[in-house]
């Protein structure tokens, strides 16, 4: 027993050594205490403004969580999604996944303005996105986690990356799996992170094909509960109403919980890309069933998968910059 305990101690020290090095390394690693000395109130400030925005608009929590996803899936978690078009930059806000639906940019700017007053050119916009995603999850009743920090901001954007890398509502399961795998995320991460659809909305245009399928018979997708489909069709007509909003989880739309998975099992997942987790793969179906049964299991894995996603290709050390305003790069 003593031998195994000392072995574990050695392993723990080895495992923690990158974290220790990060505290003094210019190349750096992401770690939760990154701003403890340079901007000790950083997390408190982010939390305050996220709570303020959420109180004003309950939809904002889902929007801020989504921004972090849409940032990380394009060139890594580098705040490229926040940049406006200017000079050589074509904004990712114009891409298909973001146009007419990405929101919350003004909340991030408000947070950034407050942080610039508190500690100028210190806290990155990429880290603000990561913290706002965590705080939004907690505010709606979801799990908390320590957010590893120290990301820097990109000097450019990628509209092609935004159009091609972010999973779309009509993608097939193999395509979605591939898009996650390209980011270093596995099947467990995929099923878990899509559970964030327990809050938020989607537009009629994102799921209309399920209500009036392409076979020409005008009948709803066979994987959609018939009564639910009839209800959806009243506000999502065959043509028009593209921007009409629908809850992704109609049972508890503003509460972060495992209801999303229960809906999938009842064939009441709004998006095709959600429902296929239950209908098209034994492996993903098994996870859906586990999470539907065990909210704690879902919360525990969601925290882990969010940290993993937040680690996608961050800019560290001297790469990138700390933007003074999130919507534009600094003048060099």
Image: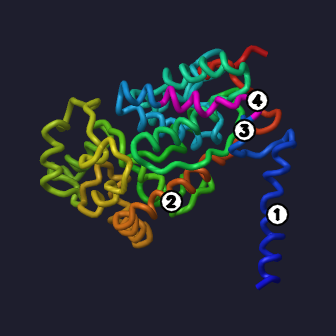
Q: Is residue 108 above or below residue 283?
A: above
Residue toward you, 149 or 229:
149
Q: For mark 4, does the 10 Å Cα neighbourhood hold few (<14), some (14 to 19), or many (20 or more) residues?
A: few
Residue at position x 33%, y 52% from top? 272
Q: Is residue 262 left or right of residue 233?
A: right
Label pair 1/3, CB-CB below 8 angstroms: no
Please tell me which of labels 4 and 3 falls first in the chain: 4
Q: Secondary structure at mark 3?
A: loop
Q: Mark 4 or 2 closer to N-term?
A: 4
Name the mark on residue 300.
2
Location of mark 4 (residue): 38
Q: Are marks 1 and 4 in contact (CB under 8 Å)?
A: no
Q: Which residues are magenta?
A: 37-50
Residue 308 % position (x, y): 61, 53
Question: What is the CA distance from the residue labelled 1 to the residue labelled 3?
Answer: 22 Å
Question: Circle 1 — which element?
Answer: helix
- Chain-order first, disc 2 or disc 1: 1
Whether residues under marks 4 and 2 lie with C-beta atoms below 8 angstroms apart, the answer is no
Q: Is residue 250 left or right of residue 124?
A: left
- Quadrant for residue 255, please give it: top left
Residue located beneath label 1 in the image: 13
* Residue receiving disc 3: 150
Query: Is residue 49 inside the magenta stretch?
Result: yes
Tell me which corner region of the image, top left, top right, bottom left or bottom right, holds residue 204: top left
The residue lying toward the viewer, choosing from 176 and 298, is 298
Q: Residues within 10 Å of mark 3 (few under 14, many from 20)?
A: many
């Amino acid at each position: 027993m003593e031998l195994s305990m000392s072995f574990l101690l050695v392993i723990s020290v080895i495992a923690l050594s990158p974290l220790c090095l990060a505290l003094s390394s210019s190349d750096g690693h992401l770690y939760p205490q990154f701003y403890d000395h340079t901007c000790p109130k950083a997390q408190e400030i982010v939390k305050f403004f996220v709570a303020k925005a959420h109180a004003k608009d309950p939809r904002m929590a889902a929007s801020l969580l989504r921004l972090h996803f849409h940032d990380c899936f394009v060139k890594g978690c580098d705040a490229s999604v926040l940049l406006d078009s200017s000079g050589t930059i074509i904004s990712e806000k114009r891409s298909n996944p973001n146009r007419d639906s990405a929101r919350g940019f003004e909340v991030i700017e408000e947070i950034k303005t407050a942080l610039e007053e508190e500690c100028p050119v210190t806290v990155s916009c990429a880290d603000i996105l990561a913290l706002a995603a965590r705080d939004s999850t907690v505010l709606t009743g979801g799990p908390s986690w320590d957010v590893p920090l120290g990301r820097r901001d990109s000097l450019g954007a990628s509209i092609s990356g935004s159009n091609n890398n972010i999973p779309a509502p009509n993608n097939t399961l193999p395509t979605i799996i591939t898009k996650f795998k390209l980011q270093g995320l596995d099947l467990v991460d995929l099923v878990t992170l899509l559970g964030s659809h327990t809050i938020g909305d989607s537009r009629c245009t994102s799921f209309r094909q399920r209500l009036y399928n392409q076979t020409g018979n005008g009948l709803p997708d066979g994987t959609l509960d018939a009564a639910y489909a009839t209800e959806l069709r009243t506000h999502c007509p065959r043509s028009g109403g593209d921007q009409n909003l629908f809850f992704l989880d109609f049972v508890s739309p503003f509460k972060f919980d495992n209801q999303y998975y229960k809906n999938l099992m009842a064939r009441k997942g709004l998006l095709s890309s959600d429902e296929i987790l239950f209908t098209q793969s034994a492996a993903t179906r098994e996870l859906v069933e586990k999470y539907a049964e065990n909210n704690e299991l879902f919360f525990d894995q969601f925290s882990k998968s969010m940290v993993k996603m937040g680690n996608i290709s961050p800019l560290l050390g001297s790469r990138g910059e700390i933007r003074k305003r999130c919507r534009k790069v600094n003048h060099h």
